[in-house]
Image: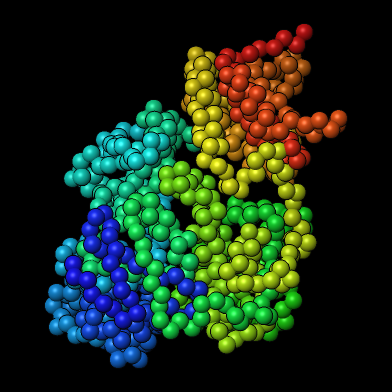
Amino acid sequence: MSRQKLTGFSFVINIYEREKEMLYSSANCGSGKTHSMIQLISINKNFYNGKVFFVQPKKENLLESEIQFKAKGMTPHIIDEDHLTEEMTSVAKGLYSYILKRKIKKTDVLLVTHQSFLKHMVNMGNITNGYHVVFDEVPQESFGEFTLSLSTNKDILLKYIQTAPSKNQDFFVLKPIDRVQMNTCMTTEGEDEINDKLRKFFEKLLNEKHYTVEIRKDVWESFKKNKRNGRNNVSFITHFYMLPEIFDDFLNVHFLSAKFEESDIYHIFKELGVSFVEKELPKLQYKEHENITHTFIRYCMERDFSKTMRSYKCLNQKTIIQNILDISRLNMSPDDKQLLVLNKDMIDGDFKEYKLPQNSELISSYVHGLNGYKHIHNITFAASLNYRNTQADFLHDRFGLSYEDIDKSFLFSSTYQAICRTSIRDKHDDSHRLITVPDYRSAVYVQEVLGIPDSRVSSLENFMFLPEQKQSGGQTKTHKQTKELTELKRKTKNIIISECKAFKDFYLDDENRFRINLLNGISTYEVAEYIDFKEPEDILDFFENESKFTSNDKHAQGRLAWCCLLLSDRNEVDGKKFGANNNHGYTCLMFDKDSSETGEDLSFLDCASWFRKQGWSFFMYETYSGKGNFRVVLPLKHVTRISHT
């Protein structure tokens, strides 16, 4: 590859011992990085020679860039579903036609969406070897999770997939056994229910050149044993990540993104051996936000907001999300307009469950690069974009990302991107503006990147009527765990599983079965549901779920678990359901550690350490009843009957 000079740039970078350019430009949102890149391509059209792909998140972005390229004397071409000619019967054919049949002009530039690029252009082979790729914002497909739950048995997957070693000893790489056979499952959507569930998973497995799919070893082993969950389904969770080889068929790639160093693709690619070179774009509007002297940040709660919390009832009988919506317009006049960012499922819904605030314009949480809202000063970001715990744990354990970096890579970057759709993107506009975010951690991040002083950051929690917050008796579950504690948790789970297998010889109703009772929460003397587990260790999943409850959930359906086995609805001796005459036996012991009246205390970790020294199987979780309180569950190897006489 020849080493060339580009005005404003000079670069050579090695990836996998090959000469290959992988560049990035990281700047503040609204600083004009996209406009600057368009100007750079236009000035250096002789260098690009009509062979450049400008890749952007949405069709709306392409239309904005088309106008800017034309203003610079360039010839932009958009190829998507809305810009097909009679000769182009599909996007794929249109892209092939553009590359192979057109007469190249130096002013040419192809505008495509992220989706079209990743679906079609990465699979075109060497016909794209001479093309430069400019990625405006990082692709969302760089990392993801598949959660599969099938009512059938494990054999349907075991005949298609096999394991191979991963670079991490706790994981397997999943690979196809027979690619031809696996392709037979890629039926048309709606044609086969099982294939519909497997399609996206199989697509990533078949695309080994561009993606790797990995699974935790213990999850895979449980799956092979046909372990079933509470819904009597076979299930497992696996993760995929993009490989740098996806860009091998292009001359070079350049990422434009605010805070690129915080993105998933940056962290993953670096761990896979990629070296990045940062290149500053010339003539950026600004490098720091200076129009913030009248900008204020408000946050709705100290605790971390999540999608699950949206429906929690507050003390005023409204949900948490409704209270966020209600207080979003505090200190705004009726004429003040605001942007309102919500999750896609809320935007796509009919809003019968929610009352939207007045004079609010709804936008998606994925609004990168759009300029149509810069006349609006105020914004409320009420979307929850946390990674699931399983996703965050994978990035932490497989690639060594800290949980703080994981929050930055997805949640915080989207919050910042949305805020920068407002008038703050105009460096000459220093209007009074209110930025409302759901939680304290988001406020801290936004304050840092915008440079807002403490005096203009305030809490709205007094207006939220929040239910009692669970107080941790040990390590707070904010995903700021060390790798050692993560490993400790994993090993403890394995100990519990191995010892719980002693239950396999216990039979209930002539069937090998393990049962737990859920109370209805409202009338705690009534059983709401019986849950039978295929394997005794599955009860631990229930206790893990229990550990997430707060006092606000104490009267919820299914809130309480009993560690005894009840024989019938009511016994004939005394007519009681929970009396001694109706108790078949105990399956585990529970110890609750509550606040000490003497002032002496035992910490969560100290208690765990003591039980582990005994070599016993146990499970612990923090309880809502007060700071420093927790429960220890010791599974018994046999059902134990206790005499009550």
In this view, 25 is above or below 425? above
Q: Position of residue 90 (x, y in %)?
A: 23, 71
Q: Quadrant of the N terminus?
A: bottom left
Q: Nearer the viewer, residue 156 or 78?
A: 78
Which residue occupies 54% across, 34% down?
Answer: 489
Q: Quadrant of the C terminus?
A: top right
Q: Position of residue 250 (x, y in %)?
A: 23, 66
Location of residue 568 (image quadrant)? top right
364 relative to 107 in the view: left or right:
right
Q: Position of residue 176 (x, y in %)?
A: 25, 42
Q: Nearer the viewer, residue 49 or 539?
A: 49
Residue situated furthest right in the rendering: 598
Which residue occupies 55% across, 84% down?
Answer: 427
Location of residue 438 (image quadrant)? bottom right
30 relative to 187 in the view: left or right:
right
In this view, 69 is above or below 312? below
Location of residue 255 (image quadrant)? bottom left
Which residue occupies 36% across, 85% down?
Answer: 39
Is residue 157 visible from the viewing direction of this image?
no
